[in-house]
């Protein structure tokens, strides 16, 4: 009897566990799709700036705005910067209760700092600038590639992305010990953004770097980039924590980021970089570049043009938001274009791909690149650009510069794929996808045996691929949501065999049952997905109505899934997601109007004359925020009406949508809640934050 | 709940879509193959309740000659038949409840982890230690560390229209 009972229960339970696993996978896919789509969005921002460049003429009415965005640097020399960053005039008053630092940094000093951050204290701006200043000075003497060794039975600890999650760093230190000469560490980039303690993590890592410069190694990640930080939260964090000195701190960090080394090599056998490689990766070339020239890895290098013809042009440093003023002559590709659409069907199908979204926005990378190339006077593909004419007047953006830049972008942004070959990474918008054959070739060429990289979140904190020649290590646990994934770090001894330690920060998630944990993560993913659904509201309704010719307002669940799949084209298994998504069903039918209403929306505070502007705004709101923050050069959080209006006009002509002046004025009015003539960026974003209408537990 | 006005063709097409969707979730290389070790999860997630023996038989039918991979071309027709024939129907709640009650010899209304572990890992198609640990994490009340099976069954029933 009990055998039969056991069999039944086993059968039931295995089924149940499998369903949970399926839900977990779908949830994962959702988060990943949205994450990569966001990064892709970021790239589109650069095409927008390119568009601005191409339309820049001295006579255009928007020239104030444009030159404002593309402002030149005020200082040129490091000594001037040092004066600007000087901390000495900043006084520490008696009311300050945080830690006091003395320099040179000592182990005690950093430990004190770690303890202080554990207790949620904030470091005084004076000490922040002092610490960062020391770090900057130190980093300038480091080579692009750190060469280290696991000799004398030293175990090297290698950590991946931390993304501002201080809990995880503290957990690693707790389990593994603090960095020291006996305990060397490599941190493989992406220390900042998304989490809310990015600055604390940086200060701790830099602190240890100052104390043990030979035993702590930091690799640059794609998020160590001030433009990316504008979008993903680090800029906001710093300005929020340091209202008076935040801008200075950010500027100094910008320099520090550009001076972070690009790679670490252990015993000439193990290569550690943040993103990965491409078929062109050449460590010798990387070792030779002037890495600090590439402030934001996603914009190609500017030519340095010295004053000629008595004109007042100044040296333009490559630190600002985008491409050079000499738009006509410079190399313009942001990613290298593929030899044609031939590769597209081979792209790893794991996320929102460019096709649907970009066509929705009338805004595709290819179209933009083509147009700009045309405007720049040549139609060749990227590969042929090296033969394009060079203007003797302009400075040279040589082929070498672009080649160098590509080396860096590839190393910071690339992802591995299962298929052979090397194709542009159109999902992220930068770097490439590289296959196992490229791994073999590049490792072979450099006589290496293993590539360790990060950049991608992995459910178990780490993952091998390419015949165990590539290892991804990711150290931010619960990255997407509580319970979504474990973090991990590597310990490696002289035998160069990686050992893994996994963990999951957050007491809450350990207390959840498996089912609750999956449910929690799932709800979070679905909330994220809601925004996508909302943005496609009108298309969804049309699609639903096709299944409802008699206008009953109800369609079957099957049709719901089919229509949603068709409109969104996300490659998500809607049939599998359905039970969690559609709560109100009767007899397997969905009231689709109700469902659409239940999607989170918020009513704008005033009537807006043009409904399409609202939709456009939703579709672009994170790009908008980034643009506004760039315009807001004094980081005051405020922009003027005029700046707002000009931005919108430019954006709308770029998007090829009609937006009337009246609509913009109405919009600005409705957002200016204080009626004081300036727009508070945070308020603006809040007004369009999607709010829960239906009560979800 | 099937739409009663559906033609046989539409039903089959519907089933195909379901199978494809589940399959694709594990098709990492986008080449219509999945690792044979994942096929159980796929089959279960389609609403079936096969025994391990059932699974092995089905896998033997569709596996590509010991490569460790299963191709959609073989899986699709086999799985379609399984679904259309309702070959591995779901377990009714009352039967499941009875099964738990059989194991709960003292009629306590709950099972202790050790009790459950003993049965699951020693009788029937035994669980591995990993499966057992996972089951306890999934089913045991986090505070009392007991398996209140009556509550569980009503909370975890399968959606019939899968």
Image: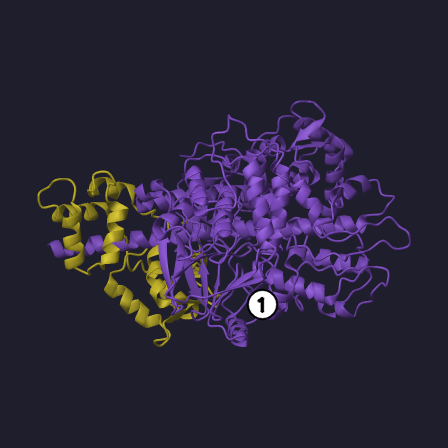
Chain colours: A purple, B yellow
| A305 with respect to B37 (left or right) | right
* The quadrant where residue A621 appears: top right
What residue appears at the point 89 percent right and 50 percent down from the top-left corner? A311
- Callout count: 1
Q: Secondary structure at mark 1?
A: loop
Between A227 and A494, the residue placed more toward the observer is A494
For disc 1, the chain is: A
Given residues A251 and A502, the one toward you in this image is: A251
Which residue is at the front of the view, A147 or A480?
Answer: A147
Is any atom of residue A237 visible in this view?
no
Q: Residue furthest left?
A: B106
> Which percent across, then down, holds residue B69?
38, 71
Coordinates of residue A250 in the picture (x, y in percent): 61, 42
Crowdedness near tag 1: few (<14), some (14–19) or many (≥20) residues, C-alpha within 10 Å: many
Q: Is residue A691 visible?
A: yes
Counting from the top left corner in percent of width and height, residue A577 is at 43, 48
Q: Position of residue A514 (x, y in %)?
A: 32, 47
Q: Is residue A674 above or below residue A115?
A: above
Assign the C terminus of chain A to one quadrant of the image: top left
Foreground residue, A484 or B93?
Answer: A484
Q: Is residue A213 above or below residue A113?
A: below
A413 vs A148, left or right, is: right
Which quarter shows the N terminus of chain A?
A: bottom left
* Left or right: residue A314 compared with residue A629: right
Considering every residue shown, the one lying at the far right of the view is A309
In this view, which residue lies farthest toward the top?
A675
Disc 1: which residue: A278
């Amino acid at each position: 009897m009990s055998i039969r009972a056991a069999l039944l229960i086993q059968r039931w339970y295995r089924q149940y566990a499998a369903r949970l696993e399926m839900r977990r996978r779908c949830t994962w896919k959702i988060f990943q799709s949205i994450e990569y789509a966001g990064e892709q969005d970021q790239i589109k921002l650069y095409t927008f700036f390119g568009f601005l460049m191409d339309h820049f003429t001295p006579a255009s009415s928007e020239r104030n705005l444009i030159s404002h965005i593309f402002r030149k640097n005020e200082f040129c020399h490091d000594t001037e910067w040092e004066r600007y960053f000087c901390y000495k005039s900043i006084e520490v008053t008696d009311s300050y209760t945080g830690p006091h630092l003395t320099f040179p940094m000592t182990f005690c000093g950093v430990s004190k700092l770690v303890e202080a951050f554990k207790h949620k204290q904030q470091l005084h701006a004076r000490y922040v600038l002092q610490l960062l200043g020391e770090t900057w000075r130190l980093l300038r003497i480091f080579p692009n590639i750190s060469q280290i060794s696991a000799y004398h039975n030293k175990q090297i600890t290698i950590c991946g992305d931390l993304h501002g999650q201080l809990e995880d760093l503290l957990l690693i230190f707790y389990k593994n010990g603090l960095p020291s000469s006996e305990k060397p560490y490599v941190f493989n980039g992406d220390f900042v953004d998304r989490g809310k303690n990015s600055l604390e993590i940086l200060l701790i890592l830099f602190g240890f770097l100052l104390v043990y410069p030979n035993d702590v190694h930091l690799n640059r990640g794609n998020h160590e980039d001030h433009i990316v930080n504008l979008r993903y939260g680090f800029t906001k964090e710093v300005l929020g924590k340091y209202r008076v000195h935040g801008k200075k701190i950010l500027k100094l960090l910008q320099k520090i980021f550009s001076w972070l080394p690009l790679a670490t090599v252990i015993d000439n056998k193990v290569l550690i970089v943040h993103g990965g490689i491409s078929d062109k990766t050449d460590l010798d070339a990387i070792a030779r570049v002037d890495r600090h020239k590439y402030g934001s890895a996603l914009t190609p290098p500017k030519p340095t043009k010295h004053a000629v013809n008595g004109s007042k042009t100044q040296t333009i440093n490559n630190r600002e938001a985008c491409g050079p003023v000499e738009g006509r002559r410079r190399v313009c590709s942001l990613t290298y274009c593929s030899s044609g659409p031939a590769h597209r069907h081979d792209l790893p199908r794991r996320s929102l791909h460019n096709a649907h979204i970009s066509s929705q926005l009338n805004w595709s990378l290819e179209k933009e690149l083509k147009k700009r190339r045309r405007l720049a006077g040549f139609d060749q593909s990227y590969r042929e650009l090296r033969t394009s004419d060079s203007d003797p007047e302009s400075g040279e953006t040589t082929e070498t510069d672009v080649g160098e830049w590509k080396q860096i972008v590839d190393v910071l942004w690339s992802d591995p794929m299962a298929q052979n070959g090397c194709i542009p990474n159109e999902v992220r918008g930068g770097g490439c996808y590289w296959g196992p054959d490229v791994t073999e070739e590049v490792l072979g060429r450099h006589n290496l045996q293993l590539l360790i990289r990060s950049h991608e979140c992995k459910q178990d904190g780490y993952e091998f691929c390419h015949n165990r020649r590539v290892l991804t290590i990711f150290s931010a646990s619960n990255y997407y949501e509580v319970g979504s994934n474990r973090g991990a770090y590597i310990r490696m001894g002289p035998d160069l065999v990686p050992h893994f330690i996994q963990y999951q920060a957050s007491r809450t998630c350990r207390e959840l049952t498996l089912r609750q944990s999956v449910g929690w993560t799932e709800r979070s993913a679905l909330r994220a997905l809601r925004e996508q659904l909302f943005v496609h509201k009108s298309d969804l309704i049309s699609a639903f109505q096709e299944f409802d010719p008699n206008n009953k307002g109800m369609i079957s669940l099957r049709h719901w899934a089919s229509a949603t799949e068709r409109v969104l084209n996300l490659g998500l298994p809607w049939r599998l997601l359905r039970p969690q998504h559609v709560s109100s069903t009767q007899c397997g039918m969905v009231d689709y109007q109700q469902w659409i209403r239940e999607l989170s929306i918020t009513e704008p505070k005033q009537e807006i004359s043009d409904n399409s502007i609202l939709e456009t705004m939703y579709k672009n709101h994170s790009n908008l925020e980034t643009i506004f923050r760039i315009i807001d050069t004094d980081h005051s959080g405020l922009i003027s009406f005029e700046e707002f209006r000009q931005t919108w006009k430019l954006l709308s002509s770029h998007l090829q949508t009609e937006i009337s002046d009246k609509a913009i004025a109405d919009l600005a009015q409705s957002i200016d809640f204080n009626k004081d003539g300036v727009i508070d960026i945070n308020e603006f974003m809040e007004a369009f934050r999607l709010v829960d209408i239906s009560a979800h537990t | 709940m099937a739409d009663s006005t559906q033609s046989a063709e539409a039903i089959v097409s519907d089933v195909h879509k379901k199978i494809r969707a589940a399959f694709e979730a594990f098709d990492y290389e986008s080449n219509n193959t999945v690792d044979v070790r994942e096929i159980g999860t796929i089959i279960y997630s389609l609403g079936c309740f096969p025994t391990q023996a059932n699974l092995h038989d089905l896998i033997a039918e569709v596996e590509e000659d010991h490569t460790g991979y299963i191709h959609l071309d073989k899986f699709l027709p086999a799985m379609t038949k399984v679904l259309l024939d309702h070959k591995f129907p779901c377990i009714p709640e009352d039967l499941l409840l009875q099964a738990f009650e059989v194991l709960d010899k003292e009629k306590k209304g709950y099972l202790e982890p050790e009790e459950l572990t003993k049965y699951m890992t020693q009788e029937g198609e035994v669980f591995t230690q990993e499966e057992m640990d996972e089951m306890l994490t999934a089913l045991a009340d986090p505070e009392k560390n007991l398996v209140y099976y009556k509550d569980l069954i009503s909370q975890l029933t399968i959606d019939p229209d899968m």
